[in-house]
Image (tube, helix red, strand yellow):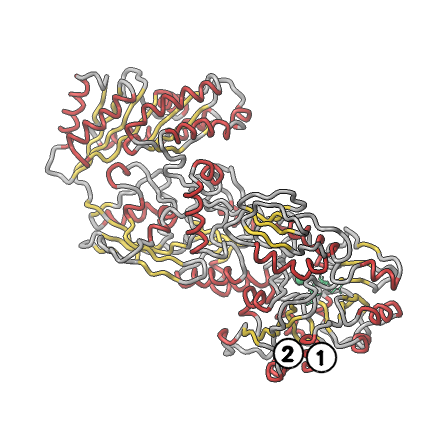
Amino acid sequence: MTRSADQTQAGRGRVERPNAATYKEAGDTLRAGGLVAFPTETVYGLGTDATNDEAVAAIFEAKGRPRFNPLIVHVRDADAAARLVVFDDRAQALAKRFWPGPLSLVLRRATDCPISLLCSAGLETLAIRVPDHPVGQALLRTASRPIAAPSANPAGAISPTRAEHVADSLGDNVDLILDGGPCPVGIESTVLDISGETAILLRPGGIPVEALSKVIGPIAPAEAGTPHASPGMLASHYAPRLPLRLEADSVRADEALLAFGPSPVAGAAHTENLSRRGDVKEAAAKLFAALRRLDQPNLTGIAVMPIPETGLGAAINDRLRRAAAPRDQKDRPQPGTYLLDKIESIVGSKGLITDAEAMAPHLNELRGRFQGHAQCIVRPASTAEVAEVVRLCAEADTAIVPQGGNTGLVAGGIPFEDGRAVVLNLGRMNKIRALDAANDTITVEAGCILHDVQQAAAAADHLFPVSLGAEGSCQIGGNISTNAGGIQVLRYGNMREQVLGLEVVLPDGRVWDGLRALRKDNTGYDLKQLFIGAEGTLGVITAAVLRLHPRPRERASAFAAVRDLNAAVDLLGRMRSAVGDAVTSFELFPRLGIDLALAHVPGIQDPLAERHDWYVLVEITGGGGGDLQEALEITLTTALEDGLVPDATIAASQAQTDSFWRLREIMVDAQKSVGGSIKHDIAVPVSAVPAFIARASAAVSALIPGIRPVPFGHLGDGNIHFNLTHPEGADKAAYLARWEEVNRVVHDIVTEFSGSISAEHGIGRMKVEENRRYKSAVEIELMRTVKVALDPKGIMNPGKIVPR
Ligand code: TXA
Ligand code: MG
């Protein structure tokens, strides 16, 4: 092939009207081994010189097409065909009747056939057709050689019936696109195999099979066992991104409708009618363009009205069934050759994981509730590499799932089971770019481990205050994307409060450098806020400027029993009025939590001598100068005298403080060790926590008598992990099967308190439907609007947060 490296991308993908000059250029390009997209009466083809091996290979590459899929060779007339294949009487008869036209004949290759063996993909046969489109015909004349041409779309996607379809999906991979307007037939050629005794219909298409059998007699359907005899038979093919629902007799407001006939069902978000008058020929011509228009990222699916099987209806229904087929990984086109090679050329072999075993840790989440599939795990080493990979995926319409330390609890970083996505793991981007002690800021890359950032801050005598259970392995990019909370939110706020600036790779591959280190900046919309907590659905965060705080000089902590939950809230108020914002953590424990910890975790001691229903862990930190220990003591003593606090112990050493925190950390594991736990990550106003816990506990006990609530967590900021252990002796699996039923009861009560159903873990995959249920239609609509504005192709972590 003569296409050279210095032929820049800029000139590629040009769309030109056919005229003498562009025909000449197209012919020259083809003869030189380039790729020219051109219209036929069926669909646009991606053409090249069929006798040039390298040129044909370039087609497979451009389409990301599995190598086993042979190509149709286009010739000017039956005589030209007869020079390439064994052209028997049946072929003659069919050619006479249907050529030029939408019929491809599969025949045995002639002994001296000059056509590249790649076109046959290892078969003895070759598919030949004579297109009936003036542009296709003219091009065959100027090229003066057979043109190999599959439909000009990425493998597995919808075929193109307009020049702009080609430009949109394959643009950069094509040297020239000849624009001949919309394709009149609109559906691909019928592929008929007459290489053997029995004629076999490999693909229904532009000529109805009934018409063919009138000329050559009976035609057999393709055998199920020979899937690659015509790889157009891949079960999942011609697929838009949205799922299809066939034979629909009604439609939801968040679905698109592919209608047929005079009375389309009402209520769709967007309707395309293939033929008002119920004409399958008209419908075929409009099919692919209509599917493209309906395939919008803000909708949940495409409902398809029934279409008759007669005439071209058979071909239409064939395409629709394939588009609706489950997108099982093995049926998907194997992008290996194209996309993965290109990704590897960007990130190198170190940056690409395709081995199943090495991919596994990136595809499963911590709790084992979700197991995804992906084409590969990409681990770029720089923002530029991230940008290039994203641009490539955007061009190939490939979903990207950004991933940090994969410690999330709602499967936001886990791809779906269809295996179409690419996981973009930021772990190699783990440099601390700068620390500005005078400005109290640190600039870090997204893959930095949270603990390492805390350490870097400490080394400069500063504090990075976000602290949570997974800090030894979670990454800053993930912390920002989920707006992580943790145990010091009361004092320092969430991750959002720490972020001053961001660097983000947008869904089209552009880089937004918003790495500003300012506390004041009122220059318009605060765009960084959009990406914080967006769980990678709007872009890939690659770096951030974070706030640092003075490192506390003093620390005092106590473990106190409280009379009841109201007393706990009361104590929090007293602490804050005594020492102000020095109250850093205020964590709640129920007695059952302590009991479970004592029974199941070795080395744990009950901090207090007697049993009480509720406890709090209070931690006060400060800049030195004040005697925090004393303030803590005085406040607790008064609370004791007033009957709020029956007993308390103040840590006398760091070891004792650590033992309090250890108890807090093992609350989760302690529950795991007794069996099934149904979990909630809720927030209500701090003042409402006692009423919420009382009501929700009563409600779940009414639903499942004997259920054991273990509400614990961040009382200081109103975020309670309302976890429910199964009744003693109950069957764990049967209990866990009631997860959603229990969620419903608890979340309904949360909503009555104007609370949040996900206070610090996010929405991910797990709570998408739950979120849709509890947020107003207006709020979901606004979220969709933002999503579509930033990610119009819907490739950035699709299906997470915003319902599809
Ligand atoms: O209408 C059409 O046929 C369009 C225009 C551009 O000609 N082309 C088209 O090509 O749809 P493509 O590659 O997207 O689909 C051709 C189908 C594939 O399913 C392929 O497997 C099958 O024809 N095919 C090609 N050569 C074959 C062969 N030798 N034996 C069996 N099947 C073959
Ligand atoms: Mg095709």
Q: Which one is nearer the viewer's eye here, 351 or 3?
A: 3
Q: Is mark 2 on a helix, strand or loop?
A: helix
Tell me which amino acid carries mark 2.
Answer: Leu
Q: Which one is nearer the viewer's eye here, 702 or 9?
A: 702
Left/right placement of residue 122 relative to residue 706 reads right
| Marks 2 and 1 in Cβ contact (< 8 Å) | yes
**Looking at the figure, which quarter contains the N terminus?**
bottom right
**Against 100, is 399 above or below?**
above
Tell me which amino acid carries mark 1.
Answer: Arg
* Mark 1 neighbour class, 10 Å CA radius: few under 14, some 14 to 19, many 20 or more: many
- Residue 595 place in picture, x, y as percent: 37, 20
- Residue 454 place in picture, x, y as percent: 28, 46
- Residue 59 place in picture, x, y as percent: 63, 69
Disc sitting over residue 30 in the figure: 2
- Residue 258 place in picture, x, y as percent: 62, 51
Q: Which one is nearer the viewer's eye here, 179 or 728?
A: 179
Residue at 30% across / 36% down in the picture? 487
Residue at 41% across / 23% down in the picture? 709
**Against 115, is 207 above or below?**
above
**Against 529, is 77 above or below?**
below
Quadrant in the rendering for residue 619: top left
**Against 331, is 511 above or below?**
below
Left/right placement of residue 698 relative to residue 8 reads left
